[in-house]
Image: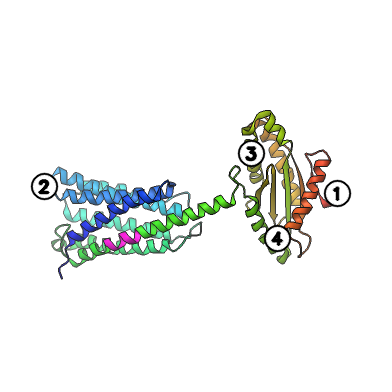
Amino acid sequence: MHIDVASLLIAMTLNLLTMAVALLAVMGKVNAAARRAQLGIVLQALGWVLLFSSGLAPPGGWADRLLSTLAMAGISSGLAFSACAFDLWCGRVDVARAPGVIALVMTAGYCIGFDHYAFRVGWANGLLALQLALVALTLCRQPLLPVGRWRWLMVISLLVQLAVTASRGVLGVFYTELFPNFFAPHPANVLFALAANVTVVMSMVAILLAHREEAARELEWLASTDGLTDALNRRAWQAQAAEFVAEAAHLQQPLCVMLLELDHFKDINDTHGHEAGDRALKLFVQGMREVGRERNLICRYGGEEFCVLKRGASLDMMRAYDARLRLWLLEAGPRELGVPLSYSAGIAILLDPRDTVEAMLRRADSMLYSAKMLGRNLTLDEQALET
């Protein structure tokens, strides 16, 4: 059976164009990662369209050189944008720049060496293979977020593309007479065309799975986070806190819970407006984060009440945290809001292996109530009351 390379590559290009349109249509409003993935597919599709268009121009002429060079720029820059998307989907903020640098170098070298057929074929396919290898290595690195199986589907797709692209480069450089043009019916070129159609589908599936996974994470975040302050909401905090308390009780490790209430919050709203009140709440949470550590579990418990769980912390460590927070607010409140900020709080410590987060919250709430009765701007704990 005769396999027509040109027909297979046209079919692949049509698949890429369909994929580009579909991703733009079905993803809707997207963030930076999905936008880069969309742009990567669009650029690759455009690159292949330009490559076919160059075949309509007189061979070796300026139009052929221009269209072919733009085609290489589209295909290689599309891979670079896809690499950025994969990095972001894996939780990395600093995305890899090497694929982008390779795209620039490859495009420039291709244009300069265009008149030498063996060079341009080897140069383009060799650097595209290097790009594919770097993107695959990026995906093989340990992600910073929980990532599903789409990552390995994409790695397989990239490795297949790498193998067939590298084989075309070797063919063009060392066996030029067997690969005189883009549509040569050599087995390596036929394999490239077949693999291109398969990997386009694999890439489409992987990108959609990655986008769906990201959307699920976003929904989970929205369900567990207070919309104003970005602190955990009460339900999510209590669920995580219960696990941490049980773990600390089992391992006999120290743990503290502090319940805080912003003092005179109603006066801030009445005097300065609700916008100032919202800014005060956000500043309060910012301070709770900045003077603490990642081991702290912070939530907006309700209204102007907040809660902090500090793992592995003794009572003295929680008292030191309280002192740092008061100093931070004393300086930040007037500077950021023009309003002094203070709070009342109650601290409860893990007493024994049978203790629970609910019991600790009740004791912390009792301390908070006492602090308010004693004039506010005060933090109390059970040991302080005993003395």
**Is residue 225 found left or right of 46 in the rendered image?**
right
Would you name the residue on which mark 2 appears?
58
Look at 43% across and 47% down and name the residue there.
Answer: 30
Task: Give whichever of 251, 53 is nearer the camera.
Answer: 53
Helix, strand or loop under label 1: helix
Q: Which residues are magenta?
A: 196-203
Distance between mark 4 and mark 2 Cα atoms: 75 Å
Whole-percent x, y for residue 148 in the image: 46, 62
Distance between mark 2 and mark 1 Cα atoms: 92 Å
> Label 3 neighbourhood size at 10 Å, few (<14), some (14-19), many (20+)?
some
* Numbered label attached to residue 245: 4
* Numbered label attached to residue 18: none
Q: Is residue 135 magenta?
A: no
Task: Give whichever of 224, 86 is nearer the camera.
Answer: 224
Mark whose residue sits in front, 4 or 2 = 4
Q: Are marks 4 and 2 in contact (CB under 8 Å)?
A: no
Whole-percent x, y for residue 119 in the image: 20, 54
Q: Are marks 2 and 1 in contact (CB under 8 Å)?
A: no
Label 4 or label 1, whichever comes before in sequence order: 4
Label 4 or label 3, whichever comes before in sequence order: 4
Distance between mark 2 and mark 3 Cα atoms: 66 Å
* Numbered label attached to residue 385: 1
Mark 1: which amino acid? Answer: Leu
Would you name the residue on which mark 3 appears?
283
